[in-house]
Image: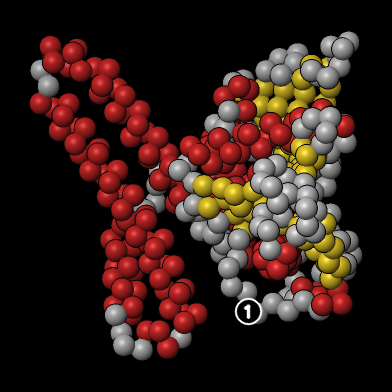
C-alpha cells in the first residue's frame, strides 16, 4: 500500500510557493535554491499522483459504459491500459520510498571490473548496458564522465552521471559486487566461468559549503583521455584523477576538454563520496574517517546472475530472485530496486522504534 498524503503535499507546496513570492526571497540565495528544489520535487509527486488518479478514473468510467459485446471488442485495449496503469502505480510506489537526504539527487554510477581478465571486463560492459537501458526506461538521461576500455575487449571501468528525479534514491541499492556465472565466450573449451564487477553509487551534490578537505591530503594526477569518440581524445592531458590519501578514495573525470572543468567535477565527486562514507560510519567530520576505505569489498556480493547450468538472478540481501535472466540483463531491475528499498524502510522504522523504546 502507498502511504501518500496528497493534501499534505499540496499544503506544503503552497507554503513554499508563498515564501517564493516574498520580496526578500533572493536575499539568501542558498535558502532560495533549497526552497525551489523542494517545490520542484513536490510538484513532481503531486502531478504524478494526479495524473495516475485521473487515468484510473477514466479507465473505470470506460469499463462501466461498455456492454458485454463492446467489452469483447475492446478487451485487448482495456487490458493494455490496465497494465500501463500498473506500471505507473509501481513507479509511484517506488518514489514514495525515497526518504534519504540525497535520494532526490542525480547519481554518479561507477562500474569496475574485478579479477578475471577479459571475462570480467566483458561483464562490466554488460552491466553498463544494463544500467543505460534501465536509465532510458525511466526517462532519465546519462553522460559518461570517465571511460577506461581494453584493447582485448570489454571495459576496465566506467563512470556515468545519471540525471533524473530520485536517480540516487533508485540506484543507491546497486552498490556492491555483482557476480556473473556463464559459459565464457572467450574460453575455447566452453568451461563455466565466474566473473565479478563492482558498482559504486553516490549522489551528485552541486553545492557543498560545509565540508573542508586539506589540500595536503590530495594527490592529483592528469592523463590523456582514454574514452571513445572525438578528435580531442588522447591529444592532451585533460583527464584528471584525484586520490584522497588518508582513505584511498579515488575519483576520475575525462568528460570535457578542459582540465579545469574535469578537476572541478572530480572534486565534487570526491566530496560526495566522502560525505556518504562519513554518514555510513557516523563520523562528525571527514577527518574522523580512519584507515583505508575499501570502496567495494569483493566479498560483499549483493547479486548473482547465473546463465549456466540454470538461469537465475538472485539478490542476496533481500532474497528476491527471478529466472528471467535476459529480462534483467536488458535493464528490467525495478523489482530488485523495490525489494531493496522496502527492506531499507523496514530497517529504518525498526531502528527508530528501538531507539525510541517502542
Q: Within 10 angstroms of label 1, few (less than 14), some, or many (20 or more) residues? A: few
Query: Where is the C terminus found, in terms of image quarters?
Result: bottom right
Residue nearest the observer in this picture, 310 or 240:
240
- Residue under the image location 81 percent in, 74 percent down: 288
**Residue 108 appears in the figure:** yes
Residue bearing the label numbered 1: 209
In the rendered structure, the answer to whether residue 84 lies left or right of residue 255 reads: left
- Residue under the image location 26 percent in, 21 percent down: 77
Query: Where is the N terminus found, in terms of image quarters?
Result: top left
- Residue under the image location 44 percent in, 51 percent down: 96
Q: How many marks?
A: 1
The chosen color scheme is: secondary structure
Residue 96's place in the image compared with 77, above or below, is below
Picture quadrant where residue 213 is located: bottom right
Residue nearest the observer in this picture, 83 or 146:
146
In the rendered structure, the answer to whether residue 173 lies left or right of residue 244 reads: left
Residue nearest the observer in this picture, 153 or 324:
153
Q: Position of residue 113 (x, y in %)?
A: 80, 39
- Residue under the image location 31 percent in, 73 percent down: 17
Picture quadrant where residue 293 is located: bottom right
Residue 285's place in the image compared with 300, above or below, is below
**Residue 202 appears in the figure:** no
Q: Position of residue 265 (x, y in %)?
A: 67, 64
Picture quadrant where residue 33 is located: bottom left
Residue 332's place in the image compared with 295, above or below, is above
Check disc 1 and report its element: helix, strand or loop. loop
Q: Position of residue 282 (x, y in %)?
A: 73, 68
Residue 344's place in the image compared with 125, above or below, is below
Amino acid at each position: 500500500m502507498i502511504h501518500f498524503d496528497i493534501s499534505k503535499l499540496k499544503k506544503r507546496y503552497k507554503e513554499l510557493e508563498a515564501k517564493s513570492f516574498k520580496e526578500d526571497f533572493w536575499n539568501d540565495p542558498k535558502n532560495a535554491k533549497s526552497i525551489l528544489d523542494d517545490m520542484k520535487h513536490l510538484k513532481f509527486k503531486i502531478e504524478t499522483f494526479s495524473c495516475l488518479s485521473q487515468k484510473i478514473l477514466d479507465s473505470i468510467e470506460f469499463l462501466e459504459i461498455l456492454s458485454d459485446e463492446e467489452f469483447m471488442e475492446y478487451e485487448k485495449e482495456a487490458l493494455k491500459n490496465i497494465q500501463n496503469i500498473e506500471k505507473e502505480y509501481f513507479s509511484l510506489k517506488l518514489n514514495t520510498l525515497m526518504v534519504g537526504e540525497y535520494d532526490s539527487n542525480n547519481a554518479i554510477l561507477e562500474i569496475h571490473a574485478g579479477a578475471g581478465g577479459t571475462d570480467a571486463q566483458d561483464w562490466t560492459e554488460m552491466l553498463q548496458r544494463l544500467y543505460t537501458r534501465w536509465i532510458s526506461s525511466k526517462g532519465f538521461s546519462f553522460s559518461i564522465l570517465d571511460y577506461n576500455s581494453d584493447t582485448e575487449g570489454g571495459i576496465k571501468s566506467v563512470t556515468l552521471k545519471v540525471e533524473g528525479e530520485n536517480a540516487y534514491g533508485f540506484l543507491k541499492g546497486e552498490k556492491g559486487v555483482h557476480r556473473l556465472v556463464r559459459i565464457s565466450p572467450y574460453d575455447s573449451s566452453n568451461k563455466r566461468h565466474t566473473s565479478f564487477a563492482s558498482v559504486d553509487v553516490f549522489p551528485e551534490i552541486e553545492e557543498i559549503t560545509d565540508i573542508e578537505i586539506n589540500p595536503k591530503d590530495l594527490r592529483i594526477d592528469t592523463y590523456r583521455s582514454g574514452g571513445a569518440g572525438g578528435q580531442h581524445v588522447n591529444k592532451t592531458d585533460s583527464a584528471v584523477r584525484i586520490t584522497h590519501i588518508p582513505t584511498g578514495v579515488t575519483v576520475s573525470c575525462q568528460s570535457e576538454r578542459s582540465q579545469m572543468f574535469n578537476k572541478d567535477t572530480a572534486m565534487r565527486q570526491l566530496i560526495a563520496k566522502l560525505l556518504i562514507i562519513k554518514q555510513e560510519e557516523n563520523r562528525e567530520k571527514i577527518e574522523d574517517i580512519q584507515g583505508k576505505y575499501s570502496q567495494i569489498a569483493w566479498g560483499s556480493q549483493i547479486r548473482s546472475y547465473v546463465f549456466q547450468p540454470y538461469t537465475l538472478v538472485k539478490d542476496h540481501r533481500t532474497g528476491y530472485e527471478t529466472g528471467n535472466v535476459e529480462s534483467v540483463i536488458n535493464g528490467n531491475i525495478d523489482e530488485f530496486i523495490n525489494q531493496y528499498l522496502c527492506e531499507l524502510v523496514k530497517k529504518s522504522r525498526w531502528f527508530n522504534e528501538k531507539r525510541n523504546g517502542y
